Amino acid sequence: MASVMRTGIDEAMLWHQGTFSAAIWDNESRSLTLRGDRMVGGDLHYAIADYGMVYASDLRGLMTECLPTCGRC
């Protein structure tokens, strides 16, 4: 998080290595950014459930977690 705050999201993601996904809230712009590592190369899926937002790189995992309570998938 320190690198995101120091350099911004795009620049910080260039230097992170390994498999990861992140949800970064910017309080100033009131925006949420979902980012995944370059190696996965896939999509990040999200849904709004009764208890909040859920995101995953694997759609099956998202559906298992969210489908019973999903408001919008």
Image (cartoon, helix red, strand yellow):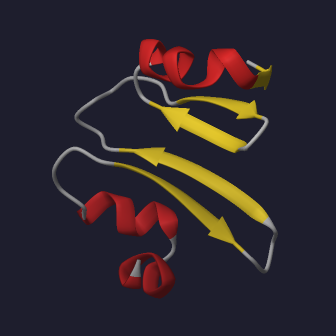
**Quarter occupied by residue 1:** bottom left
Q: How many numbered marks are there?
A: 0
Residue 70 appears left or right of 67 = right
**Which of the pair 59/2 is nearer the observer?**
59
Residue 24: percent from the left, percent from the top?
A: 56, 63
**Quarter occupied by residue 51:** top right
Residue 54: percent from the left, percent from the top?
A: 60, 38
Residue at 75% over, 34% down: 48
Residue at 41% over, 67% down: 11
Residue at 47% over, 61% down: 10
Instruction: Decide: is 26 above or below 51.
Output: below
**Which of the pair 69/38 is nearer the observer?**
69
Residue 12: percent from the left, percent from the top?
A: 37, 68
Residue 43: percent from the left, percent from the top?
A: 47, 24
Residue 38 appears left or right of 43 = left
Instruction: Decide: is 30 above or below 53.
Output: below
